[in-house]
Amino acid sequence: MSTLISSLKETAQSLTAIRRPWREFLDITAVDLPSSFSDVTTRIAQNLTHFRLNYTVILLLILFLSLIYHPLSLLTFLVILLAWFFLYFARDREEPVVIFGFTIDERLVIAALFGLTVAGLVLTGVWLNVLGAVAIGASMVILHAALRSTDDLVMDDLESPYGHVLAGGDEELDSPRGDYSGI
């Protein structure tokens, strides 16, 4: 029980660390039209990375609102959400899932959770409703991410969607050309 509580605390702390203020997220002065398709894709990638928790909350809120008139479906998805949380998101990746003495591979856990989610959608009869809610939510997220300028965002290279490209690995590179040498 204490490992469960400590796991919940660690997950809450990691979520709090990536949380962005709603005032920054909803800043009207940061909205402008992108200048090119390249600018659109860069904005979407950077905003999805920077505001990922805000976007997740919006998607979950839209999903919740779409299920408000289906209490059995809402309860089913709450149970499925808890299963995803405890078996995948809040679980320590170093410790495998063990059921009745058998070690369960992480891919099998994901496949079982995905199957449970699909079964919940089909058996409660709201799959079309959920599909519409996810499509609306994803459209809103992509529209916001494309229109919100990234000029005022302060991001570390590790937080950037291009962080693995920009980072010099374990050692810092002095030259902007990297470790290439001239011929």
Image (spheres, grey):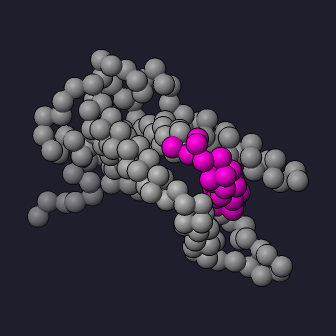
- Work out whether residue 33 can be spotted: yes
Farthest residue toward the right? 1
Which of the two residues, 180 or 28, is positioned nearer the viewer here?
28
Residue 172 screen position, x and y as percent: 39, 49
Q: Which residues are magenta?
A: 66-92
Which of the two residues, 23 or 112, is positioned nearer the viewer here?
112
Residue 70 screen position, x and y as percent: 60, 47
Rendered position, 27 above or below 125: above
Residue shown at 73% from the left, 71% from the top:
97
Rendered position, 107 above or below 50: below
User: Residue 46: which quarter of the image?
Assistant: top left
Q: Which quadrant, please, contains the C terminus?
A: bottom left
Rendered position, 149 above or below 175: above
Farthest residue toward the bottom? 102
Residue 157 screen position, x and y as percent: 39, 43
Residue 55 screen position, x and y as percent: 45, 39
Q: Name the chief secondary structure element in magenta.
A: helix
Residue shown at 54% from the left, 60% from the top:
125
Which of the two residues, 171 or 57, is positioned nearer the viewer here?
57
Residue shown at 24% from the left, 46% from the top:
41
Side of 95 relative to 170 (left or right): right
Side of 108 relative to 50 (left or right): right
Residue shown at 27% from the left, 25% from the top:
31
Farthest residue toward the top? 29
Side of 131 relative to 87 (left or right): left
User: Residue 16: which quarter of the image?
Assistant: top right
Which of the two residues, 110 or 174, is positioned nearer the viewer here?
110
Count of labels in the image: 0
Side of 96 relative to 43 (left or right): right
Residue 10 part of the magenta-drawn span? no
